Image (tube, coloured by chain):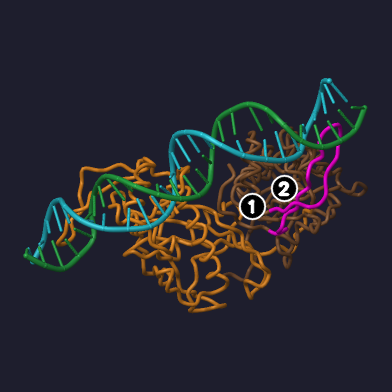
Chain colours: A orange, B brown, C cyan, D green
DNA sequence: GCAAAAGTGTTTGGGATACACCCATGC
DNA sequence: GCATGGGTGTATCCCAAACACTTTTGC
């Protein structure tokens, strides 16, 4: 193994930061400050520095470029490492990608790069292969919902069963039977009723529920 | 984005090459030629060069260090990127890892690094975090067997149902009911009977089957 | 004929699916 | 009183699980 410098690809990290707002799954994008793709929107990402784990680099970049602290995310997971030679016109760049899920995230404006959340079903054209990375994240999330409690990270601490079902439907991309969904989900004992109710308009108030575990838990039965 | 050199982690690739022989899942290891961990066994791996995809780098390294061509593998899949700062005592090294599955692989000796296949249940102590990488690969493979036809890559083209079940049992780590396994697997239409039989000893010969698809296919029902 | 592996059916319980009406509230 | 979303039960079907004996061969 050589001690001398060798010609290595650039190592970067990109984050797919998702939240669920107004019955829509939304992803965080920023505006690129430099070439290539200057002015175009892209996933937040940047260089990895030696001594930083990729996740730590992501934390630094998210804070700098979007004003979001990694600790605000409720679930973070490495997705895939994208490495095709042509993905960056400047030269070979290998990108380790992460998916982060949160609730009510608010990007800070100011010296950041015009961060905003856009619905995943109405993405603008994005720089690099970032559209493909988002598609990969969506597929992963869709799968994870069927065998884990991962939705917890997209919902507020207290939520109604309708909100929960809306999140599933938005991510799965299809509608689910209300009675079956409720019966099945409640039987998993992942959530518990709270004494609180949610009132919003001229109709019966909804009971609020809470996840028993706020960490990722695998479940046996499937919810598809 | 800076043009000047920045202090980046080293980028490497490591491969978990698996095959199924004599009712055992086996993994390819080589002996390390240099420090650190000189003489200790490790997964085949090495540096990624700019302009090479990580998978291409793995192909080069596998050929050099173990005399195995990547094209001999019947399934290759990226696993995870390991990036903890302390995993390499020489300095921060980020490793993109792959799992490769094959049948009847024979490492070439000579100028290679003493490559051999060892049963995953009887691993020697390995360099770096390679034991953890193998554990990760095994977990991934276990999952994949329940929702894809991935076993095809570990079996010869023609195989008996008992061989198939043995592979499942070795990877799942538990025994399965023979009648249920056969009925369920056959009903998936992933395999078809061939006109051939396998004879080996003083007992009834076994029918040989073949996978209809030699590429990865997702299946709906589960085989756990 | 005997040892050794191949091959084969049925029963039962539980989860998945399909489906329509009453309830509580605000105005 | 009416519009709006919240909440609830049953019947059917199919899959998963459990389980033991007969068949074919080599010696």
The disc label shown at residue B65, or none: none
The answer to if B193 sits in the magenta stretch is yes
Residue identified by numbered label 2:
B16
Looking at the picture, how far across and down is residue A141, in whole percent?
48, 57
Q: How many marks?
A: 2
Magenta-tinted stretch: B191-215
The answer to if B202 sits in the magenta stretch is yes
Residue depicted at x 56% and y 47%:
B222
Q: Which of D3/A208 is in front?
A: D3
Q: Quadrant of the N terminus of chain B?
A: bottom right
Q: Which of C23/A40 is in front?
A: C23
* Element type where label 2 sits in the image: strand
Q: Chain of mark 2?
A: B
In the image: residue A41, left or right of residue A179: right
Q: Earlier in the sequence, mark 2 or mark 1?
A: 2
Residue identified by numbered label 1:
B79
Q: Which of B48/B114 is in front?
A: B114
Marks 2 and 1 in Cβ contact (< 8 Å): yes
Residue depicted at x 36% and y 40%:
A189
Q: Is residue A89 above or below residue A215?
A: below
* Element type where label 1 sits in the image: strand
Q: Quadrant of residue B169?
A: top right
In the image: residue A22, left or right of residue B137: left
Question: Are both tags, 2 and 1, on one chain?
Answer: yes
Instruction: Classify mark 2: residues with Cα within 10 Å, few (<14), some (14-19) or many (20+).
Output: many
Give the spatial CA distance, label 2 vs label 1.
Answer: 9 Å
Q: Is residue A201 above or below residue A206?
A: below
Looking at the picture, how far across and down is residue A43, in whole percent?
49, 67
Residue depicted at x 59% and y 44%:
B223
């Amino acid at each position: 193994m050589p001690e001398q410098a060798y010609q290595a690809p650039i190592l970067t990290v990109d984050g797919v930061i998702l939240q669920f707002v107004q019955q829509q799954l939304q992803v965080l994008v920023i505006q690129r400050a430099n070439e290539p793709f200057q002015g175009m929107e892209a996933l937040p990402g940047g260089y990895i520095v030696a001594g930083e784990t990729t996740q730590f680099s992501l934390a630094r970049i998210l804070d700098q470029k979007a004003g979001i602290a990694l600790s605000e995310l409720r679930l973070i997971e490495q997705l895939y490492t994208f490495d095709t030679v042509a993905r960056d016109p400047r030269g070979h760049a290998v990108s380790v990608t992460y998916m982060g899920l949160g609730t009510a995230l608010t990007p800070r404006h100011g010296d950041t790069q015009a961060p905003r959340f856009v619905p995943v079903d109405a993405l603008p054209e994005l720089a690099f292969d970032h559209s493909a990375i988002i598609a990969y994240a969506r597929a992963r999330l869709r799968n994870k919902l069927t065998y884990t409690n991962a939705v917890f990270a997209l919902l507020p601490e207290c939520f109604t069963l309708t909100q929960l079902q809306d999140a599933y439907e938005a991510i799965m991309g299809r509608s689910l039977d209300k009675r079956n969904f409720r019966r099945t989900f409640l039987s998993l004992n992942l959530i518990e009723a709270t004494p609180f109710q949610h009132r919003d308009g001229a109709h019966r108030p909804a009971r609020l529920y809470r996840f028993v575990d706020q960490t990722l838990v695998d479940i046996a039965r499937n919810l598809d």
